[in-house]
């Protein structure tokens, strides 16, 4: 025991210095821990903001239920969008029109050929021939950008315009 007391007395300054360094290091570690705890507390408070219960597990389960509900709603909306997309393909969306003078003795371009096609290039060509004695209107069905009826030059041109509009969208 005398040896220990002699050692302490002879190294009193060194031991005191080591204890001071250890104390400073522990103080720095404590400050660092306090800063981390403060950051975590801010995140925790932000997470529990506007929440009545303080139980984090309840909050997490409530958010999980909301996420699952939104996922289900998204599936429903996605299904509706797919149905709308399918229906949209059947709408007349590719149009080509040519106005022309069908008869030499007429003044303006009062006759026309109008091609209206859906996304599958199905639809109709409507031609109106305007003359002095009256107006005649003809309709020709189109399937896949083709028809079994003979087309005039203007009808062919209107069909090509409508068909090219589909190709330019893709």
Image (cartoon, rainbow, N blue to C red):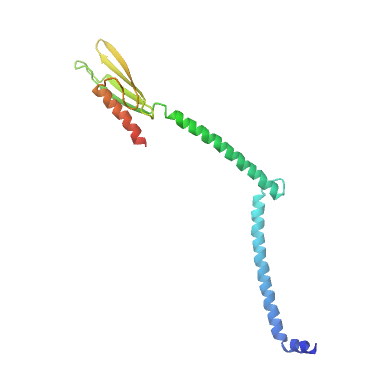
**Quadrant position of the C terminus in the picture:** top left
The image position of residue 94, as x and y in percent, is 36, 29
**Quadrant position of the N terminus in the picture:** bottom right
Task: Locate residue 106: give its quadrant.
Answer: top left
The single residue placed furthest to the front in the displayed view is 148
Task: Locate residue 143: give its quadrant.
Answer: top left
In this orientation, which residue lies closer to the viewer: 44 or 146? Answer: 146
Considering only vertical position in the picture, is 60 above or below 10?
A: above
The image position of residue 22, as x and y in percent, is 68, 76
Please report the residue visible at 58 percent of the width from the left and 40 percent of the height from the top.
71
Please report the residue visible at 70 percent of the width from the left and 85 percent of the height from the top.
13
Considering only vertical position in the picture, is 116 above or below 1?
A: above
Task: Locate residue 10: give its quadrant.
Answer: bottom right
The single residue placed furthest to the right in the displayed view is 1
The single residue placed furthest to the left in the displayed view is 104
- The answer to whether 83 appears left or right of 8 in the picture is left
Please report the residue visible at 69 percent of the width from the left and 85 percent of the height from the top.
14
């Amino acid at each position: 025991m005398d040896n220990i007391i002699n050692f302490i007395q002879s190294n009193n300054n060194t031991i005191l210095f080591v204890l001071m360094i250890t104390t400073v290091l522990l103080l720095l570690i404590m400050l660092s821990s306090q800063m981390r705890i403060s950051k975590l507390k801010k995140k925790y408070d932000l997470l529990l903001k506007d929440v009545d219960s303080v139980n984090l597990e309840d909050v997490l389960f409530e958010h999980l239920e909301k996420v699952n509900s939104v996922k289900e709603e998204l599936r429903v909306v996605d299904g509706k969008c797919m149905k709308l997309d399918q229906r949209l393909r059947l709408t007349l969306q590719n149009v080509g029109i040519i106005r022309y003078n069908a008869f030499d003795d007429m003044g303006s371009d009062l006759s026309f050929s109008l091609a209206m096609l859906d996304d599958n290039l199905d639809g109709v060509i409507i031609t109106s021939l305007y003359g002095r004695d009256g107006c005649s209107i003809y309709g020709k069905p189109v399937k896949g950008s083709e028809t079994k009826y003979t087309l005039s030059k203007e009808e062919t041109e209107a069909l090509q315009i409508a068909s090219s509009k589909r190709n330019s969208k893709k």
